[in-house]
Image (cartoon, rainbow, N blue to C red):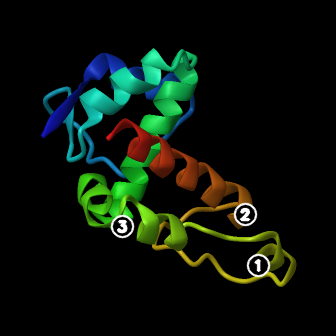
């Protein structure tokens, strides 16, 4: 299990990213089930800006909270089933279909799921 230090948590707050997928911290640390250290290092190596890295970590954490361990999804079918669950087409949008994923969120479904799907794909590239 990986740990996010308080400094990273404060950065998330400063970037206005509310991490509902993680428990509140009492001892100034949060535990994240996925291989967050490796994923974080991979995102940084891709030369993403700090805010983008923080946002991707948050999104991957939300996907994992509501759809299960990302490492297991990768081992099972290289994220195929998970990506399918996070897919929402322009036709779905046009027909005002409901959110097909387990992830609750406010706002526009098409863009939200695209962001979560992107984070899951990036995690798959890192694995």
Q: Name the residue under label 1.
A: 92
Q: Helix, strand or loop at disc 1? A: helix
Q: Which of 118 and 50 is in front in this view?
A: 118
- Up the image or down, 41 lies above or below 109; here it is above
What is the CA distance from the residue labelled 2 to the residue labelled 3? Answer: 18 Å
Secondary structure under the numbered disc 2 in the rendered image? helix
Left/right placement of residue 21 relative to residue 80 reads: left
Q: Which element carries disc 3, helix, strand or loop?
A: helix
* Residue at figure coordinates x 39%, y 25% from the top left: 42
- Say which quarter of the image contains residue 127: top left
Instruction: Compute the Cα span from label 3 to label 1.
Output: 21 Å
Q: Residue at x 31, y 62 (%)?
A: 73
Going from the N terminus, do you reach mark 3 or mark 1 first?
3
The part of the image, by quadrant, that contains residue 67 is bottom left
Percent of width and height locating residue 55:
52, 34
Residue at 61%, 68% in the rendered image: 87
The x, y position of residue 104, in whole percent, is: 51, 67
Residue 119 rendering spot, x and y as whole percentages: 50, 45
Residue 104 in view, yes or no? yes
- Using a 10 Å C-alpha cutoff, classify the residue at mark 3 as few (fewer than 14 neighbours), some (14 to 19) or many (20 or more): some
Q: Which of marks 2 and 1 is nearer the N terminus?
A: 1
Q: In this view, does 64 lie to the left or right of 18?
A: left
Vertical side of 72 occupied by 46: above or below: above
Q: Do the residues labelled 2 and 1 touch (CB within 8 Å)?
A: yes
The spot of residue 16 in percent (x, y) is 57, 32
In the rendered image, which quarter contains the N terminus?
top left
Q: Callout 2: 10 Å neighbours few (<14), some, many (20+)?
A: some
The residue under label 3 is 67
**Closer-to-camera residue (34/42):** 42
Q: How far apart, in angstroms, are the residues tagged by discs 2 and 1?
A: 8 Å
């Amino acid at each position: 299990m990986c740990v996010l230090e308080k400094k990273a948590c404060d950065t998330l707050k400063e970037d206005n990213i509310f991490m509902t997928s993680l428990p509140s911290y009492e001892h100034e640390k949060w535990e994240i089930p996925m291989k967050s250290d490796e994923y974080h290092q991979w995102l940084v190596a891709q030369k993403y800006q700090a805010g983008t890295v923080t946002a991707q970590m948050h999104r991957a954490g939300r996907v994992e909270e509501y759809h299960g361990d990302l490492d297991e999804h990768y081992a099972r079918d290289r994220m195929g089933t998970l990506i399918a669950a996070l897919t929402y087409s322009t036709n779905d949008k046009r027909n005002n279909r409901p959110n097909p994923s387990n992830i609750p969120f406010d706002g526009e479904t098409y863009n939200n799921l695209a962001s979560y799907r992107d984070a899951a794909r990036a995690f798959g590239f890192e694995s």
